[in-house]
Amino acid sequence: MEKIPFLEVFAEHPNGALSPKRVINVNGITFGQGVVFNTGLTFGGIDFHLFKYLDIAAENKEGVLIIQGFYR
């Protein structure tokens, strides 16, 4: 399992929205670049804004970053 800084995985837009910089998988759901996570919305059961700037616990498997959790 890797420990990855949040902003290496997500881009933060001027309006506060987040987008993955690479293909990610969260709770079995895969998201690619171009997906926009607005504040207060959950994707794969996660509101990424609640974990903004925390390190991410993840595993890279066949080009997909599988997010396992976040370090506090």
Image: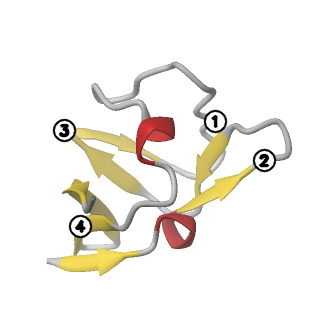
What residue did someone put label 1 on? 36
x 53%, y 73%: residue: 8
Task: Name the quadrant of the C terminus.
Answer: bottom left
SS state under label 2: loop
First in sequence, mark 4 or 2: give its number. Answer: 2
What residue did someone put label 3 on? 27
x 25%, y 73%: residue: 62
Mark 1 and mark 3 residues within 8 Å of each other at the beta carbon: no
Query: How many residues crowd mark 1 within 10 Å: few (<14), some (14–19), many (20+)?
Result: some
Residue 46 picture quarter? top left
What residue did someone put label 4 on? 58
Q: At which x and y percent is residue 66?
A: 24, 59
Of residues 9 and 70, the one nearer the viewer is 70
Q: Nearer the viewer, mark 2 or mark 3?
A: 2
SS state under label 3: loop
Q: At which x and y percent is residue 33?
A: 59, 52
Cα gap from disc 2 to disc 3, whole angstroms = 24 Å
Q: How many marks?
A: 4
Residue type, label 3:
Asn
Query: How many residues crowd mark 4 within 10 Å: few (<14), some (14–19), many (20+)?
Result: many
Mark 4 and mark 2 residues within 8 Å of each other at the beta carbon: no
Query: How many residues crowd mark 2 within 10 Å: few (<14), some (14–19), many (20+)?
Result: few
What residue did someone put label 2 on? 13
Cα gap from disc 3 to disc 4, whole angstroms = 12 Å
Q: Does 2 appear above or below 30? A: below
First in sequence, mark 2 or 3: give its number. Answer: 2
Cα gap from disc 1 to disc 3, whole angstroms = 17 Å
